[in-house]
Amino acid sequence: MNGNAPIARLRIGLIGSGFIANFHLQALVSVRHVSVSGVYSPTAANREALAAKANALELGPCRPFPSLEAMLISGEVDAVWIGVPNFARLDTMREIHRVVKAGWAKLAGVACEKPLGRTLAEAREMLRLAEDAKLNHGYLENQVFSSAVQRGKDIVWRRAVPVCGRPYLARAAEEHSGPHMPWFWQGSRQGGGVLSDMTCHSVEVGRYLLTKPGAPRTDLTLVSASATVGNLKWTRPDYAQRLKRMMGAEIDYTRHPAEDFARGVLIFRDAEGHEVMVEATNSWAYVGPGLRILIELLGPEYVMEFSSLNTGLKVFLSREVAGSEGEDLVEKQNAEQGLMPVLENEADIYGYVGENRHMVDAFRQRRRPLETFHDGVAVAQMLMALYRSAEIGQVVRLPAPELETYVPPVARA
């Protein structure tokens, strides 16, 4: 690379080889000027399998690396995507910072999956490390980059807002029947329960929709947070035992539950002094066809609506059609028969294609992405305010200095 000249083809190194890394591979097939040249994860078989998949998709040449340092100093990657579990993200960023600061590696950027940190303190440290290493940084919040969200926001703000005023309420919900991996269910490792895992999506897509196009992301100031969390399904004895059988003996929801339902309301003030609101509802207790995302934007004379399960493609399978369990129709699929919605391209509909295209272009052109680690910090602040509200049973008003060191109850040792 030479000075500030654009990078002709961005070579990505994937850190992590699990569920989300595979989504990124599916998305990157639809992105130009990019290759996946390296994979690192602690488990050799997993990193080898992901590298082989990248090569099979003709995203390579890609090879697995035995350590993160080896991948960073190889000269074969221009940017890295952090997709390791929540509890490993800060240590991963520290290693990137160490190698870059030592002058052993030159990176055009680092992108990190949601949430940026399990606490506000962790998120702030992620940001500090990235900026101290002088790295361009992107926050991988896929729902913001969904084509439905991008197109809907454009229409509302271009056609409706100039006539009758800005939107004042964004509603967002994401629900499914529960995560795939054991660490998601462990409050101390994940950082919480469904509020940490899924409300991070809902509050940020709501904040984005309410922000005036072209305005800085700081245009909205968080004023207050109110939340309720609950254990509706997975603490019931039969389901707690089922969860232990699925995830292992260390997941005991009769003793160490993390919330499987969360509802929160955030109030913001815009630059003109108007109050606007984000309402988020999330659960691991929804048993429908599969993962369901609902997004609405309301204003004085208009509404924007999106539902991921309101698909144009559906199939019906009678009781005579028996098949093994899988997720070939929709993520978190809960049935194999009946009238089933089909998501033709989940990576696109959920926003992974748009997200990866945007981050690749930003890093190649050395521009600041739409979503940065600063937004990851803002999300962490929103989540901690919601957790604190649920814990004390009161509205939390901002600024709230206690959030800087706050740890949600289910994440405490």
Image: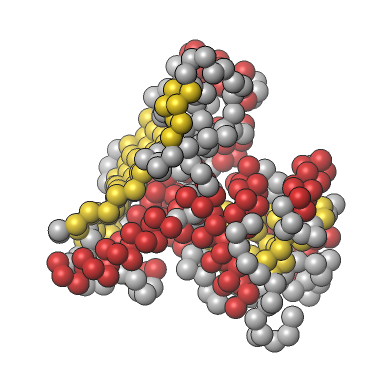
Side of 231 where 410 appears, left or right = right
Q: State the scheme by which the image is colored.
A: secondary structure
Viewer-side residue, 88 vs 8: 8
> In the picture shown, does residue 230 fall above or below 275?
above
The count of marks equals 0
Side of 320 where 56 appears, left or right = right
Viewer-side residue, 100 vs 305: 305
Viewer-side residue, 324 vs 391: 324
User: In percent of the image, x 57 and y 34: which residue is there?
Assistant: 328
> In the picture shown, does residue 144 fall above or below 45?
below
Considering the image in quadrants, where does the C terminus appear? Answer: top right
Measured as percent of width and height from the top left, residue 264 is found at 32, 44
Side of 154 where 322 appears, left or right = right
Measured as percent of width and height from the top left, residue 24 is found at 62, 52
Q: Is residue 296 visible?
A: yes
Task: Name the quadrant containing residue 147.
Answer: bottom left
Considering the image in quadrants, where does the N terminus appear? Answer: bottom right
User: In percent of the image, x 46 and y 43: which residue is there?
Assistant: 198
> In the picture shown, does residue 70 fall above or below 232?
below
Measured as percent of width and height from the top left, residue 281 is found at 35, 40
Q: Is residue 83 visible?
A: no
User: In percent of the image, x 33 and y 59: which residue is there?
Assistant: 152
User: In percent of the image, x 84 and y 60: which residue is there?
Assistant: 70
Measured as percent of width and height from the top left, residue 169 is found at 24, 54
